Image: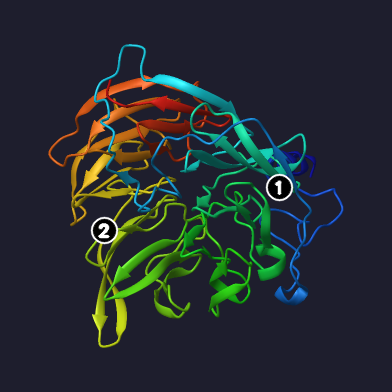
Amino acid sequence: MLRFRLKFGKSLIFPLIIAILLGLLSGYWIYEYVSYDVAPRIGGQDGRPQIHPMDSPESGPTTIEGSLQQFDGTPSAIAGNWPMFRGSDGNGVIESDVSLARKWPTSGPVKLWEVQLGEGYAAPAVYNGCVYLIDYDMQAKADAIRCFSLDDGKEIWRYSYPVNIKRNHGMSRTVPAVNDKYVVTIGPKCHVTCLDAKTGQFRWMIDLVSEYGTKEPLWYAGQCPLIVDNQAIIAPAGNEVLMMAVDCQTGEIVWTCPNPQQWEMTHSSILPMRFADRDFYVYPGSRGLAGVSAEDGTLLWQTDVWYLRTNVPTPVNAEQGRIFLSAGYNKGSMMLQLRQQEDNIVPHVVFERQPEVFGSDQQTPIYYKGYIYGVRPDKQLVCLDMTGEVLWSSGSQNTYGLGPYMVANGIIYVLNDDGVLSLIEAVPDAFRLLDQAGVLDGHECWGPPALVAGRLLVRDLTTLVCLDVAAQ
């Protein structure tokens, strides 16, 4: 009997150790990645990032009192705009009127200015000589919508409102949308804010969590807003509303698209698209992909052939009614073809590819002159044709981590995790590295770049820099 007890006791040691380790890991995860608000409750902000005790949409608008600060910066006279996520056309491509360097001095491109930021991956929009960015002020415990001069990086104004968050793989991570009159942002905890683009004066705010039942995404909001015809286009993916248009002047709802299947918000942004003489918005929710009429919010089409709750890349308009989709987590990629059948638009799968062929963990691929360029999970930059065949890859000696990229004047600008910026020809016949240089002190350089008049804006976790990439 004693021998049996000893044997039985030893057999429990290993499972007991495993149980203790799992408990410790669970505690660490809760401490490190799940935030609990300790401040008084404001409009449904209490709770954890993934699970909110939500108020009903009928409970009324949330009011969070913010503050506006003015500084001594002044808007630049430099012409050119990058007004939203992925630029003027929303495709990550620009044909610059300013000639761009294809080779840099040994020291790399000249750094014109830099600004220190709160932790995050939020990237700038540029309009009328101003650089707009949503930041997080850890000391003040506030989202901060900041406006800088493109000339020298001096701050012009800052609008802040209190919201209590903690580090969760960075904090802010979206790009503002801006036009002549308005700037619209989405904060980490799904606060949609509209300000006067010139003065920073408050217009309105919508708390998507408390007002629409939005479930805060796992790593905070990653959706970047749109402004179309002075309307903010937002996808709450809440209890009742999948997508909506909001009048930027008044904050009134112009139209809504219902959400009967209860799709939840992903980290992806909305893609504007036109097909069969119809303008619509494409959005990948947690359970499928939808096309919503830009005119009145009618659901034109939807499909469940592609979905992932943690989807990060935005759908890519590959022209001629094609939509290219990609994601991480072993999801891979897919090409859809929209077809008109009588009065309906119907999506059809053209091809699917496994992640080792192409997938994208974080950044949105780029369609350029009939080909797709992007960084796949093995961190190599690749070029795909419209059949999903890989035409070239950068090889294991040229990898780019989770870093962002864009195309300007036929050149791919790609930034790796460590802050090394590379120039690569955007051509389908071969991988051609033109030059590379370290431009940041490199920690999680993941924010999408912006390029205006030969000035390239890139950031790492805590620093935004403006580089002169014009031909000398």
Measure the C-alpha gap from mark 1 to mark 2.
38 Å
Q: Which mark is residue 318?
A: 2
Q: Position of residue 297 (x, y in %)?
A: 48, 77
Q: In the rendered image, which residue does mark 1 sit on? A: 34
Q: Secondary structure at mark 2?
A: loop
> Residue at 39% of width from left, 63% of height from top?
272
**Residue type (three-letter) at the residue carrying disc 1:** Val
**Residue type (three-letter) at the residue carrying disc 2:** Ala
Q: Answer left or right for 58 relative to 182.
A: right
> Residue at 56% of width from left, 42% of height from top?
133
Q: Which mark is residue 212?
A: none
> Residue at 23% of width from left, 27% of height from top?
433
Q: Is residue 23 visible?
A: no
Q: Position of residue 424 (x, y in %)?
A: 25, 31
In the image, residue 333 above or below residue 378: below
Q: Answer left or right for 262 relative to 151.
A: right
Q: Earlier in the sequence, mark 1 or mark 2?
A: 1
Q: Secondary structure at mark 1?
A: loop
Q: Nearer the viewer, residue 247 or 299?
A: 247
In the image, residue 217 above or below residue 465: below
- Residue pushed farthest left? 429
- How many discs mark residues in the rendered view? 2
Q: Position of residue 107 (x, y in %)?
A: 36, 12
